[in-house]
Image: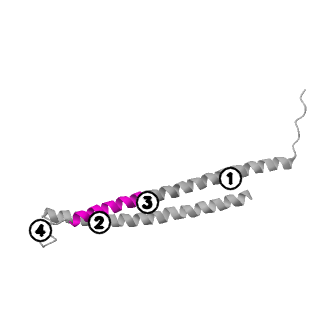
Amino acid sequence: MQPPPRKVKVTQELKHTHAEQISRLHIKHQTECDLLEDLRTFSQKKAAVERDYAQALHKLSNQYLKREWPASLPEEPTDHRNMYTVWKAYLEGTVQVTQSRITACENYRNQVSDPAKTARLQKEHQLRKLGS
């Protein structure tokens, strides 16, 4: 015959359940903080790569724009039958696009990275409050 099951005090059982829940919540918050930090780091690195690409393309386009054009170029810039005019328009368009890319990179970094950092700091603050 087996002895009767031990009766555990209700308060001890509640403390144990509470400790488990706090532990799970702590793990959840820590995981979310890590994810937010990864998101912030990724967005910063992505913006830096995009910015470097745009700056390199901008520099390349400007180098080709500075080249001497043949003397046979017409003074009329609207003559799209001339291949030099088309090439120059293409390079000028590329310069404008790269400037837009650089601006977009800065906006992306500001719109994603900074709010992610703020959210992570808030999560860490909640985590510290939970631990107290």
| Residue pointed to by mark 1 | 26
Tell me if 41 is positioned left or right of 48 in this view: right
Quarter holding the N terminus is top right
Q: CA separation, marks 1 and 4?
A: 71 Å
| Residue 59 x/y as whole percent | 30, 63
SS for tag 4?
A: loop
Q: In the image, what residue occupies the spot 88% across and 41% down?
A: 7
Q: CA separation, marks 3 and 4?
A: 39 Å
* Disc nearer the start of the sequence (3/4): 3
Tags 3 and 4 touching, CB below 8 Å: no
Instruction: Provide the residue span drawn in magenta.
Output: 48-66
Determine which of the numbered discs, if any, sits on residue 95 in the image.
Answer: 2
Q: Which kind of residue does numbered mark 4 sit on?
A: Leu
Q: Which residue lies furthest to the left in this view?
A: 72
Determine which of the numbered discs, if any, sits on residue 47 in the image.
Answer: 3
SS for tag 1?
A: helix
Q: Residue furthest bottom?
A: 75
